[in-house]
Image (cartoon, rainbow, N blue to C red):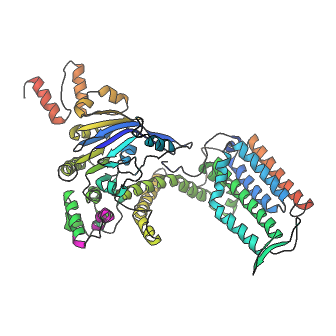
Amino acid sequence: MKDVSFGQYYPVRSFVHRADPRLKILFLIAFITAIFIAKNFYGLAVCAFVLLLAILFSRVPFLKVLRAVRGVLFLVLFTAVLNLLFRTGEKTYWDGPAVYWSWKIFSVTQEGIVESLFLVVRLILLVVCSSLLTYTTTPVSLTDGIESLLTPLKWIRFPVHELALIMSIALRFIPILMDETERVKNAQMARGADFESGNPVRRVKAVVPILIPLLLSAFRRADELGDAMDARCYSGGKKRTKYKKLRLGWRDLIVFLVGAAMVTGVVLLRIYLGWPL
Amino acid sequence: MRIVAERLNYTYNANSPFAVHALNNVSLTIEEGEFFGIIGHTGSGKSTFVQHLNGLLRLPESKKRKRRKSKKNAPHSTILKVGDFDLTDKKTDFRALRKAVGMVFQYPEYQLFAETVEEDVAFGLKNFSEKKLTKEETAQAVREALEEVGLDYNAVKDKSPFDLSGGQKRRAAIAGVIVTKPEVLVLDEPAAGLDPLGKKELMELLHKLHREWCKTVVIVSHDMDEIAENCTRAAVFSEGRAVECLPPRELFKKTDELLSLGLDVPLTAKIARALKERGIEIDCDFTVDGFVSAVLAKGGKP
């Protein structure tokens, strides 16, 4: 926990933070479905409005949430540009030529402009909503939620509990390994290692003095953790109780209702209103 | 090299909900030739402080500070100097600084990575040398470093560092730092995890290094006996501040203050306090030898 704050979790108390992780995961799934059901900008507007409300009630600063888009900015722009250049079509949505510019197989059409705009909005909504989940839910309660949601798979003997355990151990050890990376990196930098300059091959080579000690310590820790679990007679799934039991409350009812209303609204808008407006 | 720090501040994760104020107006001077101790409980900022000494942590160059700098030597600005290196200046040659200030981290054996001990020790040497060293030059420097830390060059040079014993690993790792002959050697809890004999040998090794290789030695330690026995002066860190900076002789007279900070004092200081409660005042430097002679001088009989 030094200069790198782990993950994205934003520690405040809010309506969204305190909602049940299962409901939040389901809501995210509903949201993504709604985005893809939406066939016109009205549908996306409904989703955007719901998302805006969620951000307001999560008390995470708006700019901070938007920053999540930065990570996929390249992807968003890339898709937009591809769509803009390759989309052909004669439809017009406003006064003006249907085709603005064309050269060989590339062309900028009204259809292309509208389509890429639609895609950009869709992608941004998608990314922002997923990152809102990680901003408002600790990794531990996220895995708890996933484990609980996957419980039906136990019927087909899918090792749900083990999977959740692996996930939570992995998450639990990320900050420790990051700390360790920092430490080893510092130690090698103190011995004059340079990770920032040189050509790519050199830079990859420069990582070796960090990677080897890190792997070794990861194995050592895994061994120790295994021993410690054995020493406490740990054995998976059955009959284990939880320290924090997930309980549904009034917040979850609201989350459910909002999600349901949103999906219904988007479906209705898809049926009764056409593309794009 | 003289180390001067004045009004040093450092915050981890600045401007985020995780912000931790690790250093708070730390002012400290370490003279050339000292065997300097830094004590403080976990999270007191001592490790943060020593990481500044070779530029692993840098002072944030804020706009405010730049403005102050233009008003030449404003009275409240931070000063951090190691010898001639001015660490408040962004243009400082940090490579040269790191060559001059060797840093041994906690559990240094965990930084070993190369296939052979020789390669691992030569890592820093190769990184810091201006020109490409010949095989002979490298081997010579590595041999000197390994022998300085008490390892047999011929016996270990081709071994994998991971096949060495715990104590040998630590020595090899220290050799990997001193191989460039730094003027200042900083060690973060060098004796952590060693058995009593290992600790004693390590402190002997550090004294040898202090005499022969590195003019100034700075150690971070929890072990007060170690500080009392070895250091010329020691600084006490608490909650990001350097609250005391005294020779052990004076420092450990403040037993009550140290205990109230959640720190320990050397056994000699505890006994001295117990004797004081019974009306016997002992004036000594709190090393075992010094304490014994002071007691004997009081008691008269040998």
Q: Say which quadrant the C terminus of chain A sits in.
A: bottom right
User: Which x, y percent locates residue B40?
Assistant: 36, 37
Q: Quadrant of residue B156?
A: bottom left
Residue sitting nearer the eye, A174 or B144: B144
Q: Residue at x 19, y 63 (%)?
A: B152
Measured along the vertical axis of the image, is residue B237 above or below residue A246? above
Give the farthest residue toward the front: B71
Give the farthest residue toward the left: B301
Q: Is residue B126 magenta?
A: yes
Residue sitting nearer the eye, A39 or A260: A39
Q: Residue at x 71, y 41 (%)?
A: A15
Q: Which secondary structure is most common in the magenta stretch?
A: helix
Q: Is residue B293 left or right of residue A264?
A: left
Magenta region, residue range: B118-136
Q: Is residue A59 left or right of residue B1?
A: right
Examine the rendering and report whether any part of residue A227 can be seen: no
